Image (cartoon, helix red, strand yellow):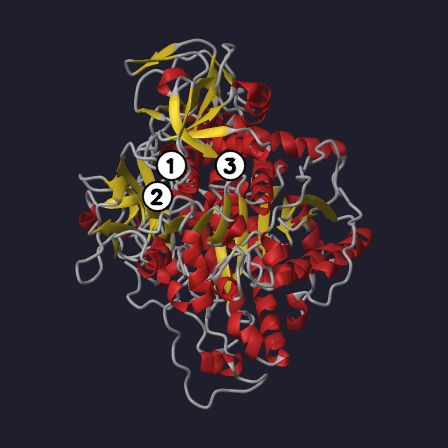
Amino acid sequence: MRLPIALLSVAVSAVLLLPPGAAAADPVAPPTPAVRDFGNGPERSEEAAGVSERAEALRAPAEEPFRHAPDRDRGYPRQTLLPVPAENPADASIKLGLVPYHGIAPRLNDLQKRSRRVSVEVIGRTHQGRDLYLVTVTAPESRAEAREQDRIRERIENDPAAAARDRGLAKKYKAPIFVNGNIHGNEWEGTDASLRVIEELATSTDPKVADLLGRTRLYLNVTANPDGRFNGVRANGAGFDLNRDFVTASQPEVRAMRQVMIDTQPVAMVDLHGYVNGTLIEPTTPPHGANYEYDLFIRNTYANGLGMEAAVKALGHTPEADGVFPPQIPFRDSPEGWDDWPPIFTPQYAPFQGAVASHTVEIPLRVNGSDYTNLPAEELRRRSAINTEIAAAAIRATHGFVRDRRDQLIADQIEVFRRGAAGEPARTVPLGIVPGFGPEDVYTTTYPRAYVIPAGAGQRSATAAARLVDHLVANDVRVERARRSFALNGKTYPAGSYVVDMHQPKRGLANVMLEPGADISPRVDAMYDISGWSHALIWGATVDTVTTGSLRVSGEPVGAAAPTGSVPKAPGPLALKVTDAKEVLALNELLAQGVAVTWASDGTAIVPAAARAAARAVSGTYGVAFTPAGPATGTPLSPVRIAAAVSADELFTLRELGFAVTPVSTAVLNAGFDWSDIDVLFVSSGLSHAALNPAARAALDGFLATGGVVTRGGTGATFNAAAGLLTATAVAGRGDANGVVRVTSSAGPVGNGSPEHSFVYSPRWFTGLGPEVTVEQSYAADGPLVSGHWRPNANGTGGQDAARNQAAVVSGRDERGAAVVLFGTEPMFRNHPKGLFPQVARALYWSASVTAPAVTTP
């Protein structure tokens, strides 16, 4: 059992405000328990994205996407003369005495000149177009030696049984280590610590360092978030927390990190963060991810955690002298609250790519937020110097750990892949495998024999299926496409169906994406972040689970999903059913071209025969399938122009879907806003009706006579009530409740065609519905939560039982004429639930067009 007292902490302000060299007069109180940032906090309810002085950061990404193609036919060093950005005194890191973004490339160019141990590659570009630098530090290798390293790495993954039998493999293989710095932009010092360690290793004349670099390759992503580093904010240039994006990979920075981990296959990784005092070093508290080979993982991660703890202690910092508390290890020091359940974080994703020791490290002294604004530069620089020293110690300790435990780490990585390829059952971790590992730490899963993503009539959405397949392949999950029809568990699948054979090295990653997940509410009181995310349930595709049986399918490996677009040969108007995000994109492109589209009440877009060439073009671009359109009644649809008081992830998603979006907020409306170019107001964050001045309210009332409104969450529900829109009382579930839920949808304009599952965070439902209100979607009567965490509040309210059969999404017309949709679910959360995006689009199309006169297509 763990120690009963949690030492996880944030800094004690009285200690942190000590001037340099000062000592506390009285004994320093122990720090209070630390918690991670709330997963659905103010940035998704109180702050409207895109309207601040940093609004430019939330615009569309650079036109030309960056594609990194590593040159594997070269030895080391693989040196690149990096372009040097122009100096910019506005870089937020300068105030802390740290290296600004424009100063990184010159340092790396200089180190490449000075040392053949250092290689630098540009592995991608950020949302705002800044280069991402990967540094490799290792002993020089000839082309033949580098090829041999590649062959060994590939053998470990592709033939792990043979690799396990090869007693000489570990002696020949340079163990890979991955260090990720500065993924949160205003947690700066991981970058500076990485640069310090690179220079030490590059210039050292110590024979022990030469020996170390002959046995390892150290890969350092120097700054994972250059946009955030420059701007002094946590998020990237699109407003995303990159350390929540790994199973979605919506952002270019995350896709670059993912590819690095696939290409390098590290045995150990460290992700450098701030700020928790004392220094927080994983492993984590329960619940633990059920798809890891946790017996291998916890032994190595705890051992390296202890080593990093010792290295930080050896620096000699104390609370009394400089405000630094002793390090803490959540697994050892706290019962819950800092878990490794969801694979959305870098250190929780890395094990699926082979890391058998993986850590978040939170350095201690806060220099961001109000401290950055209010403290003297001298104090901030004192803190950043200590933080850099501690982060560097963590890197050095991990490097040494891999040196000392290299053979075992390589053997354990091989064993992870061997168990997957052999299809062995998941292992239950023995109690006491490390000190303190008890029943509360035991989480396991049952791997199915396979997953099938059907083709043909059994598939809800061919475009969604193709997206899911491409996502799996991008994560290095192996997928095959059936050459001919086959039968599994008594069900026949047509040729072209996709099969994910769970006898594969990275089965853990395949399963963590495709399994439904679990309701872990009974086991822990609170979670660090999201607890359910199933791609199979909320990405819009039909996915069948094959639990047992023989898998005899004639298939071919998939590098990319097969094309899905089609246009019927028969003449006449065409129908496009909007059930996937790609269909939304295609429809919005047709509207932008001026095609006269009719929006039918069942959520189908009718395209005139005269626009067949345009339909054929978008069909090829987006992979959407048109069908012949029979007679239908609907309303003319024009490009939907949205005024959006929304969170950054929603703004990103709406624009990604091809909508024209103008960000607004309370302040924007109060300053005078021209509603003449707006069709729909979307409210979820940063807009208070009560705070509008009389002129702004009058202008809004004028808009509501013809315009539409879509809202989400608590801010949206409050706006609905204050504006007197729909007669509906919003009931709040527990604030941190989240996960995948079962829903029942109606045949209404929004609910029709929706998936059987949705996603919630801080869920809401609607009661006291007026006669003008239609229930579009309800939480399942037999209990909504499939996977995630949803407990009631302490007073018994807000639990999932209270949500049974309650309205989750409603629509209606208010007395002024506005068409209104209220969401109690989270259909665009962090750009993840792809299968729910069309529901949002249908809400926008309906609310924008329903006031127009109906027309009938022949």
Q: Nearer the viewer, residue 633 or 462?
A: 633
At label 2, the amino acid type is: Phe
Q: Nearer the viewer, residue 762 or 377?
A: 762
Query: Measured from the top left, where is residue 529 in percent x and y?
Result: 38, 53
Circle 3 residue:
638
Quarter of image, res 796? bottom left
In the rendered structure, find residue 538 and report the number of the disc placed on it.
Answer: 1
Which secondary structure, mark 3? loop
CA gap between label 2 and label 3 equals 29 Å
Query: Measured from the top left, where is residue 433 in percent x and y?
Result: 34, 48
Q: Are marks 1 and 2 in contact (CB under 8 Å)?
A: yes
At label 1, the amino acid type is: Ile
Query: Measured from the top left, where is residue 366 in percent x and y?
Result: 52, 71
| Label 1: how many Cα within 10 Å (few below 14, some 14–19, many 20+) | many
In the rendered structure, find residue 759 and report the number of the disc placed on it.
Answer: 2
The residue at 55%/27% (across/down) is: 622
Quadrant in which the N terminus appears: bottom left
Specify whether residue 430 is in view. Answer: no
- Compared to 301, does 53 lie above or below? below
Q: Nearer the viewer, residue 58 or 697?
A: 697
Q: Are marks 1 and 3 in contact (CB under 8 Å)?
A: no
